[in-house]
Image (tube, rainbow, N blue to C red):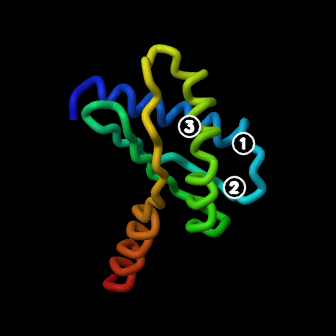
Amino acid sequence: MSIRMGRVGAEMQKALTVIIGSKLKDPNIDGMIAITEVDCAKDLKTAKAFVSVMGADKHATVAALNAAKGTIRRHLSQELKDLRTVPEITFFADHALEQGNKIDSILDSLK
């Protein structure tokens, strides 16, 4: 990954956290949502945002975020004025937290 893609991904991660937390009014997006990672394509036309959801149905929340990605992209273009074009975002569920908890429980059972 190039330095530029890493910087754009980090800035998008910060902006998405603010947008989802304060500017979206969708009742289907509830629970505690954290953007864990944003992977941008080399041409910066598309991006994958990985979402961790706690306290709500993960798949329904990710589907609601994908349904609202036009609105999110519009807000993102207002936040990231340095980009010529804002990447098309696709949201995916992040299972890293669940896998970490599973590994911890396995290690605890071995003790």
The local secondary structure at tag 2 comes to loop
Q: On the image, which quarter does residue 76 sit in?
A: top right
Mark number displayed over residue 24: 1
Circle 3 residues within 10 Å: few <14, some 14–19, many ≥20: many
Q: Which amino acid type is shown beneath numbered disc 2?
A: Ile
Q: On the image, which quarter does residue 108 sit in?
A: bottom left
The C terminus - image quarter: bottom left
The residue under label 2 is: 29
70 or 63: which is nearer to us? 70
Q: Which amino acid type is shown beneath numbered disc 1?
A: Leu
Which residue shows up at 61% across the image and 62% down it? 54
Tags 1 and 2 in contact by the CB under 8 Å rule?
yes
Q: Earlier in the sequence, mark 1 or mark 2?
A: 1
Which residue shows up at 52% across the image and 32% down it? 14
The N terminus - image quarter: top left
Q: Earlier in the sequence, mark 2 or mark 3?
A: 3
Q: Earlier in the sequence, mark 3 or mark 1?
A: 3
69 or 93: which is nearer to us? 69
Q: CA distance from mark 1 to mark 2?
A: 8 Å
The residue under label 3 is: 16
The local secondary structure at tag 3 comes to helix
